[in-house]
Image (tube, rainbow, N blue to C red):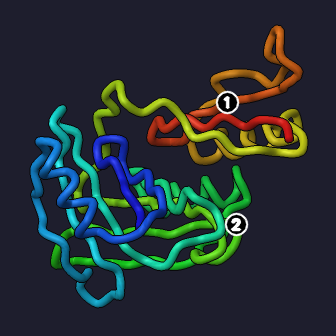
Amino acid sequence: MCVLPLHLDHLKRCKNVVQKLVEDVRAKGGTVTREPGPVKGGKSIIAFVKDPDGYMFEIIQRPSTPEPLCQVMLRVGDLERSIKFYEKALGLKLLRTIDRPEYKYTIAILGYKEEDQTTILELTYNYDVTEYTKGNAYAQIAISTDDVYKSAEAVNLVTQELGGKITRQPGSIPGLNTKITSFLDPDGWKTVMVDN
C-alpha cells in the first residue's frame, strides 16, 4: 500500500489495504475525495483523501517493493526535458511512459531498477501547464552517491544544457562527517546528494 501526499506531490510509502486507510482517515476527521477503486487499465487500487489540515493524499494498493518508499512524484512543465535531466544528472533509466489524453496528462516512470525492485521517480506533465507553485511543504529529495564532487560536476554540466542550478557546492557539513551537494532541477525541485 502506498500513501502519497498530493500537495508534496506523490510521496509513496508502502503498506497494505486501501479501504482500511480510507476508513481511518474518515474516523480521524478527514474526507474522501475519491472512493477506493481500480485504476483504469491497471491492477492498482487507488483512493484520494484529504486530512483534517487540508493536505491531499493519494493511497495506492499495489505489490510492495523491497524498499519501504515506493515512489516520489514531481509535477513538471516540460516532460521530455525533465526525463533527459534525470537520466543525465542522476543516471535514472526511463522505465515507461503513460499518456492519458482523456485526463490531459502524461507520466514518465524512472528508476535505477525495475518498478517492483526500487523506489521510482514519477514525473507528471499536465497538458498546457508549464509552471507550478511550490508552496512551503516540499523540502528536498536526498540521494546517496559515492562521490559528491564528481556528482556535482556531472549535474553542473546537465544544468548548463537543460536548466536548473547547483544550490550548494559540494563539501563537508560543519560538525558532521558527511559531504553533500544540492541542486534544483529545471522546474525548481531540490535534490541533495549525500556521500555514502
**Residue at mark 1 to residue at mark 2: CA–CA distance:** 20 Å
Residue 42 place in picture, x, y as percent: 33, 87
Residue 196: quarter of image = top right
77 left or right, relative to 126: right
Residue 106: quarter of image = bottom left
Between 72 and 98, the one lying in front of the other is: 72
Residue at the location (25% across, 51% down)?
129
Residue 30 place in picture, x, y as percent: 13, 45
Q: Secondary structure at mark 1?
A: strand
Q: Are marks 1 and 2 in contact (CB under 8 Å)?
A: no
User: Are there few (<14), some (14-19), or many (20+) residues within 10 Å of tag 2?
Assistant: some
The image quadrant where one finds the N terminus is: bottom left
Residue 182 disc label: 1
> Which of label 1 and label 2 is nearer to you?
2
User: Are there few (<14), some (14-19), or many (20+) residues within 10 Å of tag 1?
Assistant: many
38 left or right, relative to 90: left
Residue 147: quarter of image = top right
Between 21 and 7, the one lying in front of the other is: 21
* Amino acid residing under circle 2: Tyr
Between 74 and 37, the one lying in front of the other is: 37
Residue 103 place in picture, x, y as percent: 18, 72
Q: Secondary structure at mark 2?
A: loop
